[in-house]
Amino acid sequence: MCENCSPGKPCFAQDNYKFYHSDEYGHVTGEQNMMQEIYQRGPIACGISVPEALEDYTGGIFEDKTGDMDIVHDISVVGYGVENGVKYWTIRNSWGTHFGESGFFRLIRGNNNLNIETQCAWATPLDTWTEDKRHKLTETEENDPRNKVKENVPAKTDLFLNKGGCRVEKASFPGGEKRPEVHSWEELAPEDVPKAWDWRNVNGTNYLSWNKNQHIPTYCGSCWAQVATSALADRFNILLKDESPTPVALNAQVMINCKAGGTCDGGNPGGVYFYAYHWGIPDSSCE
């Protein structure tokens, strides 16, 4: 799960590295519940439809006029707000920073536009970053033949170089949700939730992990893996606050390699959160 390599020499497994686990996970739907979950615990992963106009989006508050409700894409909702009396969601896409507003777009909120308020998933982070909880390399892992490549050259694989289309599945969790006794949206009254919130700027601090582009090095329909790992990484950043010198970034490639919810032809963010609970996700310096 975590290797390093030297030029022209065999790659080798690392003997001490961080794994990031989820603690609880489940669904959330509806404007008010989504707002509370985002405000209290961090970004969430949601399925949306993608009309042609969204692909051409460059800025502003987007509103689909076609009535498209066919969910085919996953995004993460990182905040919400109001501009000139119009309510909106703040959304991070996985099409690169050249898309929209530096990789983000705003979508009208409260009328389930693009079907965004019906199919969302969340997961909470679990402390696995302290030194005594790092993963220690076992003898079996060290002797795994996959670590004994003859030389360090680009691998031939179709795991990430698949040119198929992306079709996301309804968020689901093998064995069901692992939910708390009381959900976040059952703890506060709607009037106690801020009218606007954005995890990119909370008292001057940006808690988000970096934006990704699922289309490079070549097209991969991995939005489900990109947004689920990004939203969970955000929540680690929120939890760690000043304890981490660099932002956490979780490895979407590992989720694809391990089929932890899907493939380059689409998938399900719930599978990522289930995988994180049972096995953990390495950061983006490991593959």
Image: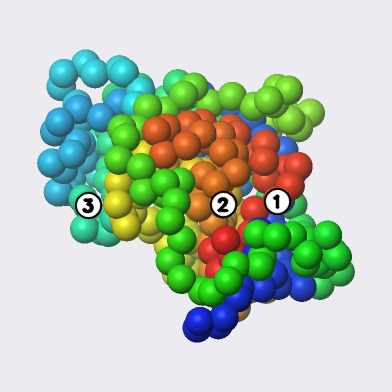
Helix, strand, or loop for circle 1? Answer: loop
The amino acid pointed to by label 2 is Val
Q: Is residue 153 visible?
A: yes
Q: Residues within 10 Å of mark 2 (few under 14, many from 20)?
A: many
Q: Residue furthest bottom?
A: 7
Q: Position of residue 90 (x, y in %)?
A: 35, 45
- Looking at the image, is mark 1 or mark 2 earlier in the sequence? 2
Q: Examine the image and state in which quarter residue 162 appears.
A: top left
Q: How many discs appear? A: 3
Q: Nearer the viewer, mark 3 or mark 1?
A: 1
Q: Nearer the viewer, mark 2 or mark 3?
A: 2
Q: Is residue 135 above or below residue 227?
A: below
Q: Is residue 44 above or below residue 214?
A: above
Answer with left or right where residue 89 lies relative to residue 55: right
Comparing 45 with 200, the one in front is: 45
Q: CA distance from mark 2 to mark 3?
A: 25 Å
Tell me the residue that label 3 is attached to.
Answer: 99
Tell me the residue that label 1 is attached to.
Answer: 280
Q: Quadrant of the N terminus?
A: bottom right
Q: CA distance from mark 1 to mark 2?
A: 10 Å
Tell me the residue that label 2 is attached to.
Answer: 254
Q: Are marks 3 and 1 in contact (CB under 8 Å)?
A: no
Q: Residues within 10 Å of mark 1 (few under 14, many from 20)?
A: many
Q: Is residue 194 visible?
A: no
Q: Nearer the viewer, mark 1 or mark 2?
A: 2
Q: Residue at the spot x=64%, y=27% of the render?
A: 173
Q: Position of residue 177 (x, y in %)?
A: 70, 26
Q: Quadrant of the C terminus?
A: bottom right
Q: Is residue 151 above or below residue 265?
A: below
